[in-house]
Image (cartoon, rainbow, N blue to C red):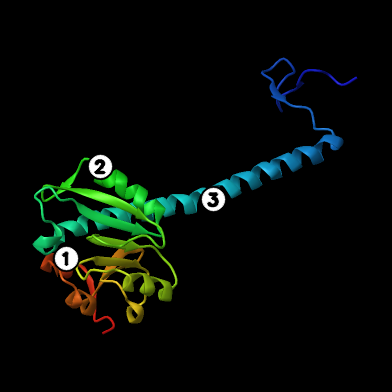
Amino acid sequence: MRACCPIPIPTPNSPSTARRRWALPPLPARMLAPVLALLSLFALITALTGAVAAPNEQKQEDAGARAAYLYSFLGYIEWPSRTLPLTDSPLVIGVLNADDVAAELLLTTMGRKISNRTVTIRRLQPGDSLEDIHLLYIGPGEPQQVQALIRQVPQRWTVTVTDDASADTLAGVINFRHSDGRLRFDVSQAAAERGDFKLSSRLMSVAIVQPGPN
């Protein structure tokens, strides 16, 4: 009958009464396969969990960076006085096709002001009115769809911000892009000149200025 307790093994080159070390009995062959299967399953679950968590964390980090940029842009754009008729008229950021960015913006702007004005975040769905929006962010999408949305903006003073458009398809005034592992932004000079607003020289100095389509 196999012992119920670990088997004492004498230390080499020492008398039997010397200090002993302990070892577990060998695992029966019939139990080896299930144990290995459980270990393999645990390793697979761990790997899959990490693979899912990493992209989610990256996505949230990217949304936070975009939200921070969008909020900062407000301080470097000058709009006509008629777009802010009252001293307490809010600055409005519209967000389309990017619920994660809208959520981050709500957190970023909570209790904060730009030039003593509150900031309103408007979550938009396709087909919603695009009137009276100072800064409109359109999330990633097909270039033709993004351009069609921009054409629906009824006023020339809305600053449009797009995502990952190539230099020859820039439709918005500002476009986010990744460069050297960092989030940067382009400014379409042609779109900026057509708009009824003014981008500050400080904003232009840190942007990647593109001629943009005429």
Residues at badges 3 and 1 in contact (C-beta under 8 Å)?
A: no
Q: Residue at x 17, y 70 (%)?
A: 204
Give the residue at mark 2. 110
Q: Nearer the viewer, residue 114 or 59?
A: 114
Quarter the N terminus occupies = top right
**Among numbered discs 2 and 1, the one appearing first in the sequence:** 2
Q: Nearer the viewer, residue 206 or 34?
A: 206
Q: Amino acid at mark 2?
A: Met
Image location (x, y in percent) of residue 162: 33, 67
Q: Nearer the viewer, residue 140 or 65?
A: 140
The local secondary structure at tag 1 comes to helix
Vertical relation: 86 (above or below) 208: above
Q: For residue 93, which quarter of the picture?
A: bottom left
Q: Residue at x 11, y 64 (%)?
A: 80
The local secondary structure at tag 2 comes to loop
**Among numbered discs 3 and 1, the one appearing first in the sequence:** 3
Q: Amino acid at mark 3?
A: Val
In the displayed structure image, the side of residue 100 where residue 184 appears, left or right: left
Q: Nearer the viewer, residue 207 or 211?
A: 211
Q: How much space separates mark 2 and mark 1, taking CA atoms? A: 23 Å
In the displayed structure image, the side of residue 2 where residue 117 appears, left or right: left
Give the residue at mark 1. 203
The local secondary structure at tag 3 comes to helix
Q: Mark yes or no: residue 179 visible.
A: no
Q: Which mark is residue 52?
A: 3
Image location (x, y in percent) of residue 134: 22, 60
> What crowding class fits label 1: few (fewer than 14 Cα within 10 Å), some (14-19), or many (20 or more)?
some
Q: Residue furthest top?
A: 17
Vertical relation: 46 (above or below) 70: above
Residues at badges 2 and 3 in contact (C-beta under 8 Å)?
A: no
Q: For residue 171, which quarter of the picture?
A: bottom left
